[in-house]
Amino acid sequence: MIATVLCGSRNIFTVALDDARIIECRLKGKVFKDDGLYANPLAVGDRVQVECDKSDPDRGLIVGLEARRNMLMRLKQRGQLPQLISCNIDLVLCVTTPEQPPFRPRFLDRALLQADCAGIPAMLVCNKKDLFAEDLCIESRLCDFQRLGYPVFRVCALNGEGMDELRAALSGLCVTMLGQSGVGKSSIIKALSPRAPIRIGALNQKYDRGNHTTVMASVFDIAGTEKHKSTRIIDTPGIRTLLPAGISEENLVYYLREFAPLVGTCQFGLSCSHEHESGCSILDALNEGAIHPDRYESFLRIRDELRFLRAY
Ligand SMILES: Nc1nc2c(ncn2[C@@H]2O[C@H](COP(=O)(O)OP(=O)(O)OP(=O)(O)O)[C@@H](O)[C@H]2O)c(=O)[nH]1
Ligand SMILES: [Mg+2]
Ligand SMILES: [Zn+2]
């Protein structure tokens, strides 16, 4: 029987069978084709073949893995294998805040890069709109993401502001939430589906950030309404560091939307470092404002990191 992984780690997973029954499965002595490429053998959203236990209807054994439509991954630490966050999804929802925790556009650049590299559409949600005092730096970055084609939603999970638009945008999709601890990923799911059995954490007063309340990726189904189809949301634990996974120094530019069309058009072609050369299309775009200075800075930092990761 085919099932979808809802949550789990190491070798015990909760899966939903295609007849809607939810059972617990072991992954025992089974080696998949992709084994050895990722830190975890299975991720939430994976489609697996299951053999049900004949004596216990609530248990089974995972015996195979169906082909993956896509994989969202991350690298936690240099020298480790990439971790699969979720598989077979339609959308990555990158969640951020203007305050508590502070706005971190570099995290967004990385999260969007990871989504683009996986070929998965992405949107941004700026939560905690209630804490948003007019801040030109934040607005400038949010507008730039919009300009690049990432829809941006400004919402407040606490008072429901902006939630209808977000709900409509998620209609019929399977979505993965991505963001730092404390930005309100779980709160947004709770706002969309008040009866969802989900834990919301308090903020750490001293450090103005989350306490890593969600500890494991898991799935929540939000029922459809007359206006919207149902939505499946994967809540994930807050991410501290997001090192680029599955991207090389050479192909980084292809995954930065405003950089990609310029590749190869510099005077020195593909050998241009885009740092000091005359006739560099990327530096020209930066000077003309077609590339936001912050995005250019992110590009340099991520490229440095990729060099460092490769030198391992
Ligand atoms: N002021 C304000 N606080 C909010 C809003 N949404 C969530 N919070 C608060 O932010 C804190 C963290 O919320 P969570 O939903 O647990 O955050 P999370 O992103 O799931 O965090 P982790 O599970 O640790 O990754 C809680 O104290 C929420 O009440 C909002 O719109 N405005
Ligand atoms: Mg959470
Ligand atoms: Zn160049």
Image (cartoon, rainbow, N blue to C red):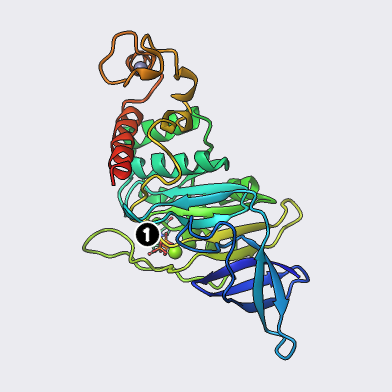
Tell me the quarter of the picture where residue 250 sits. top left
Exactly how many numbered labels are in the figure?
1
Q: Would residue 161 be found to the left or right of residue 230 on screen?
A: left
Secondary structure at badge 1 equals: loop
Where's residue 263, x and y in %? Answer: 45, 20
Quadrant assignment for ligand 3: top left
Give left or right: position of 3 versus 151: right
Percent across and percent down for residue 149 are 53, 31
* Residue at numbered disc 1: 181
Check the image and report above or below for 191 versus 304: below
Residue drawn 33% across and 45% down? 103
**Looking at mark 1, is its residue's CB closer than 8 Å to ligand 1?**
yes
Q: Where in the figure is residue 83, as x and y percent of width and height?
A: 45, 57
In the rendered image, the vertical position of residue 38 relative to residue 249, given as above or below: below
Figure quadrant of residue 44? bottom right
Q: Residue at x 54, y 48 (%)?
A: 92
Residue at image point 67% right, 54% down: 67
User: Where, by quadrant of the figure, is residue 292 drawn?
Assistant: top left
Nearer to the camera, 70 or 228: 70
Q: Residue 55 or 236: which is nearer the viewer?
A: 55
Q: Amino acid at mark 1?
A: Ser
